[in-house]
Amino acid sequence: MTELIPSQKIDGLIIAKLRVFGDPRGSFRETFRKEWFPQRSWEIVQTNCSHSAKGVLRGLHYHFKQVDYWYCPRGKIRAALFDMRPNSPTYMATETIEMGEENDIGLFIPIGVAHGFATLEDATLMYVVDNYHDGADELGVMWSDPQLGIVWGLENPVVSGRDNGNPLYQDVPPEKHPL
């Protein structure tokens, strides 16, 4: 059975330690079940797949209307998370988690937790969301914000113009803070 491990640093963040079944033909694993996360009434409406070369950094993004569940079936990433919810007991906490072939886990990311990842080697990230993509709900905070203290593990990451244009956390207007 898949073991669900609540984060010790960010409230509501859950690591799903997946069970792998292997034989000489290869391997099989369940990567997601909505019953693993009963605290959230899931209606899976969209799944996404991102391929990134080694050295790419994506994020930090957050939403008001969408949770994410991540699974990295190929390569290796360092997921970075930052709790932006002022009413959370772990407000302002950060955490990094390595995921991929050598650490076969899923990651449940609640609303209001900013998230991003750095590819430590070429990688594929699959993610399941409970709401359709909505550009108005795609918010961000600067990945390199020194206040967050995130160690990405990349010296010169390849970052999109949009992600490089995100504000520092201290400059995010109050109406753009999650509850």
Image (tube, rainbow, N blue to C red):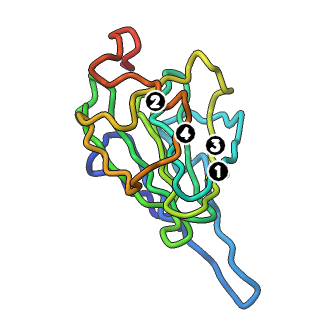
Identify the residue shown where x is 71% and y is 36%. Answer: 46
Where residue 140 sits: x, y (%)? 46, 26
Q: Are marks 3 and 2 in contact (CB under 8 Å)?
A: no
Q: Residue furthest front?
A: 156
Q: Residues within 10 Å of mark 2 (few under 14, many from 20)?
A: many
Disc 3 versus disc 4: distance between alpha carbons?
6 Å
Q: Residue beneath label 2, please?
A: 111
Q: Residue beneath label 4, please?
A: 68
Q: Is residue 81 above or below residue 162?
A: below
Disc 4 versus disc 2: distance between alpha carbons?
8 Å
Q: Residue beneath label 1, please?
A: 126
Disc 4 versus disc 1: distance between alpha carbons?
10 Å
For this rendering, which residue is in front, 57 or 73?
57
Q: Residues within 10 Å of mark 4 (few under 14, many from 20)?
A: many
For this rendering, which residue is in front, 178 or 21?
178
Identify the residue shown where x is 33% and y is 28%. Answer: 84
Disc 3 versus disc 2: distance between alpha carbons?
13 Å
Q: Quadrant of the C terminus?
A: top left
How many marks overall? Answer: 4
Residue 93 falls left or right of residue 134: left
For this rendering, which residue is in front, 73 or 43?
73
